[in-house]
């Protein structure tokens, strides 16, 4: 377990980039995303494609706090139900079952009655905000990119809107907004399957720093060093009869291992 860092203080080298706070009792805890995309990645890709495995492992999986389903009529009405219920209910702004009372037992007197909503429909047709049951706080200058899980098969019933939350400044519900894409068919969110992946991003990497870029628009503008790099990465492997597959993966893993040993 990590100790909580003091607000406003720079973290030590052993301080976590992010601390997750579970508000809803018994909701699944986030876990580190894995290189095999929760075991779904094809074996050949897992073995040879370092780009895919690195992207899959970048961040943490977040799960729904309970198994529930949404159903949209294509217009202004959305219905929902959850594990243990046989009926469908019109979706308004709703609390997680039993959470409001649980929250009020622990919250300071002046904060009672302010428990976050679990589900809330938007004015836009078919759009719903879903709370994971978690809050998050990141180290100074770090935020969280909230998105759909990387390289996992996606539900055909909804799409995630992506967003970057400045969780070093904003201590609020870790939520997502989804757009339902199927009508009159239940769309399930399973508590055993991640529906979000949150990834740490430094504020400096998504601000004005992105304005500093260049484009080489013609082949004739490539320099000798560029062609030499092309030769090393494209030509040489294809003319070497003894080359082994996955050299990029081997090189990347070796580099990570050397970096870890140097620390």
Image: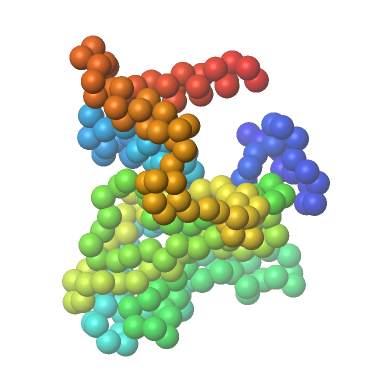
Residue depicted at x 35% and y 28%: 231
Towards the viewer: 80 or 177: 177
Q: In this view, does 124 lie to the left or right of 158?
A: right
Residue 196 picture quarter: bottom left
**Residue 167 placement (x, y as % from top left):** 63, 57
Q: Which residue lies furthest to the front in this view?
A: 220
Residue depicted at x 61% and y 45%: 18
**Residue 140 placement (x, y as % from top left):** 72, 50
Marker count (numbered):
0
**Residue 36 placement (x, y as % from top left):** 33, 34
Towards the viewer: 33 or 66: 33
Q: State whether residue 27 appears in this view.
A: no
- Give the quarter of the figure containing the N terminus: top right
Q: In this view, does 188 lie to the left or right of 263?
A: left
Does 230 appear above or below 4?
A: above
Residue depicted at x 74% and y 43%: 5
**Residue 4 placement (x, y as % from top left):** 72, 43
Residue depicted at x 47% and y 68%: 118
Towards the viewer: 122 or 192: 122
Q: Residue furthest top?
A: 242
Q: State whether residue 70 appears in this view.
A: yes
Does 223 appear above or below 215?
A: above
Residue 16 picture quarter: top right
Q: Which colour scheme is used?
A: rainbow
- Give the quarter of the figure containing the C terminus: top right
Q: In this view, does 126 lie to the left or right of 135?
A: left
Does 191 appear above or below 163?
A: above
């Amino acid at each position: 377990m990590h100790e909580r860092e003091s607000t406003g203080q720079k973290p030590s080298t052993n301080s976590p980039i992010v601390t997750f706070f579970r508000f809803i009792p018994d909701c699944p805890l986030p876990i580190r995303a894995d290189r095999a995309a929760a075991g779904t990645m094809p074996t050949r890709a897992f073995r040879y494609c370092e780009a895919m495995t690195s992207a899959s492992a970048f961040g943490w999986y977040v799960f729904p706090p309970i198994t529930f389903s949404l159903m949209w009529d294509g217009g202004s009405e959305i219905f929902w139900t959850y594990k243990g219920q046989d009926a469908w209910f019109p979706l308004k702004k709703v609390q997680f079952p039993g959470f409001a009372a649980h929250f009020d037992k622990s919250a300071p007197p002046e904060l009672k009655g302010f428990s976050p909503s679990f589900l809330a429909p938007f004015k836009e047709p078919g759009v719903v905000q879903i709370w994971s049951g978690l809050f998050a706080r990141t180290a100074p200058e770090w935020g969280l990119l909230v998105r759909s899980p990387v390289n996992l098969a996606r539900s055909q019933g909804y799409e995630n809107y992506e967003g970057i939350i400045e969780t070093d400044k904003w201590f609020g519900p870790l939520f997502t907004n989804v757009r339902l894409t199927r009508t009159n068919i239940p769309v399930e969110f399973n508590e055993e399957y991640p529906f979000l992946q949150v990834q740490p991003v430094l504020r400096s990497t998504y601000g004005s720093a992105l304005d500093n870029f260049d484009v080489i628009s013609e082949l004739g503008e490539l320099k000798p060093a560029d062609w030499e790099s092309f030769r090393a990465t494209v030509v040489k492997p294809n003319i070497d009869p003894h080359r082994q597959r996955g050299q990029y993966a081997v090189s990347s893993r070796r580099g990570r291992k050397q970096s870890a040993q140097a620390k």
